[in-house]
Amino acid sequence: MKPDRPDLLVLGAGPAGGTAALFAARIGRRVALLTGPAGGSLIAGAAEIDNYPGLPRLAGHDFLATLARQCQDAGVELAARTARRFTVENRYKIIEDDTGTSWTAPAVVIAVGTSPLPPDIPGLDRYWGKGISFCAWCDGQLFRGRRVAVYGGGNTAFTSVTILARLAAEAHLLLPKRIGTAFGSLRDEVKRASNVRIWPGVKVEAVMGDTALRALTLRQDQEITTLEVDGLFITLGQRPNTGFLQGSLDLTAGGFIRADAAGRTDLPGVFAAGDVVDGSFRQLVVACGAGATAALSAERYLLQQW
């Protein structure tokens, strides 16, 4: 059931959105949380989280389920809806969801996250969280002493392979083009790593394994190679889930939301947190902190303006 005009409307039930909703509810605000599509948060695919301070290892979906229970216990109204349209009327923020229902609140926190740009590789879906990851910072530790590959050619790809080179026995950088587009200093650092092999102009044709990823089929020019690996990190970019905000908020050319350190956007009463924010460090602990910050900024706004 839709609540009567909440004080705060939160979009996205990932780490940032869930934390924002929890913080606001725990200080007595009426909060509605539109969770977005099932499994929409990237952290849901993490087989194991082991880099959150003070938190024992657990799977990404367990983390999100725990956060959702905390929100419910604090009085947050959770709705399995996805934002489709955003407008402002008489200072009220109005969100129309995918069922055509309109939600109205004086303040909103946007934490809708991003969607990775996955390559078209047969069998890819079978090994998400079972050897295939989007985040070397998050999951690199799981592959200590093993064989890994990074697929991509930008700054994230080169940074990822430098991290993995410290942990893995061997690391392979699979460049979709002949040369990478990363900063020169990153390219030089990768070249200095003795356990990194660079594959220029290569395409991942297929992934293979049993209960987990075991090998890749690569095409380089006309030659087909089977590369045995335990992990594949895909770093081909991410797309922010902000299509419904076009023309309403200040977005970058890539669709990320411009927000200050307090989570404030260019519209009063509209805050943003997490991966969807331009320049954000896309890490779990950072997203949670940003969500808390956005909630506290929203509380300050409500006290001063309403």
Image (cartoon, helix red, strand yellow):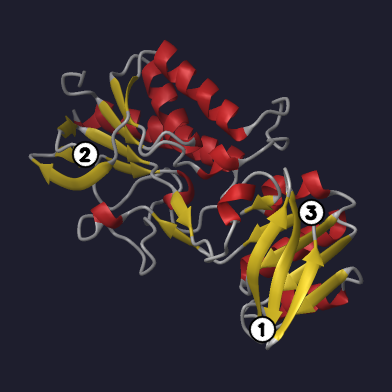
Task: Kindly identify the amino acid type of the residue bearing the numbered disc 2.
Answer: Asp
- How far is mark 2 from mark 3, CA to CA? 40 Å
> Residue beneath label 1, please?
201
**Label 2 Cα crowd, 10 Å radius (few <14 / some 14-19 / many 20+):** some
224 left or right of 45 in image: right
Could you tell me if residue 63 is visible in this image? Answer: yes
Q: Which mark is residue 264?
A: none
Residue 78: image location, x then y, percent? 33, 23
Question: Is residue 179 rendered to the left or right of residue 245?
Answer: right
Residue plotted at (47% across, 29% down)? 19
Mark 2 or mark 1: name the one nearer the start of the chain: 2
Instruction: Measure the alpha-carbon separation of dots 2 and 1.
Output: 42 Å
Q: Is residue 203 left or right of residue 35?
A: right
Quarter occupied by residue 273: top left
Q: Quadrant of residue 214?
A: bottom right
Relative to 234, residue 59 above or below: above
Q: Which mark is residue 97?
A: 2
Position of the C terminus, as image quadrant, is top left
Q: Give residue 81's position: percent from left, percent from top.
A: 28, 34
Which residue corresponds to mark 3?
230
